[in-house]
Image (tube, rainbow, N blue to C red):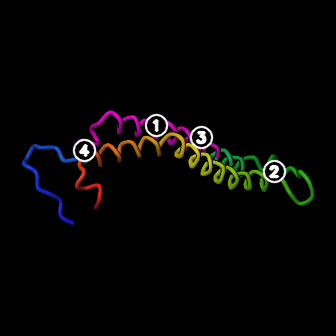
Amino acid sequence: METPSTPEGTPTEVQLIEQSEEFAALRRAFRGFVFPVTAGFLLWYLLYVLLSSYAHDFMAIKLFGAVNMALLLGLLQFASTFGIAAWYARYANRHLDPKATAIREGAAAANPREAGA
């Protein structure tokens, strides 16, 4: 697939999209979700590691049967990972995908010969 050559200094279609306010809003929406959720999960994971390393008595508390606090918190790490993935999918479907579709359709309308390719 060949890309058409442009004179030096003329922005390409991709550069125009990246410079648009719609694309900036999409990036803000993405970062507004991903950065805080990632920081929260990393803190939760760090708490688990620190408790495992330094709070042996707390992590050894028997909850029921052979299940202790360490096992429960470890399983909650997996549960929170899947929960965050589901949360992100829902967020993306509601907030990111409509914005990305609008950008894509706007670019296709601006360049109709590329839309069929």
> For the point 41% across and 39% down, which residue is it?
26
Q: Name the mark nearer the viewer: 1 or 3.
A: 1
* First in sequence: mark 3 vs mark 4: 3
Q: Position of residue 84 (x, y in %)?
A: 62, 48
| Three-letter code, disc 4 | Ala
Q: Residue furthest right?
A: 65
The answer to whether marks 1 and 4 mark residues whose Cβ atoms lie closer than 8 Å is: no
| Range of magenta residues | 16-44
| Three-letter code, disc 3 | Gly
On the picture, is 54 further left or further right than 90? right
| Three-letter code, disc 1 | Ala
* First in sequence: mark 2 vs mark 3: 3
Q: Nearer the viewer, residue 96 or 54?
A: 96
Q: Position of residue 29 (x, y in %)?
A: 46, 37
Mark drawn on residue 110: 4
**Residue under pointer 2:** 69
Q: Nearer the viewer, residue 49 or 30?
A: 30
In three-dimensional space, the C-alpha distance between marks 2 and 3, rounded to whole angstroms, equals 21 Å
| Three-letter code, disc 2 | Met
**Residue under pointer 3:** 40
In three-dimensional space, the C-alpha distance between marks 3 and 4, rounded to whole angstroms, equals 40 Å
**The residue tagged with tag 3: helix, strand or loop?**
helix
Q: Name the mark nearer the viewer: 4 or 2.
A: 4
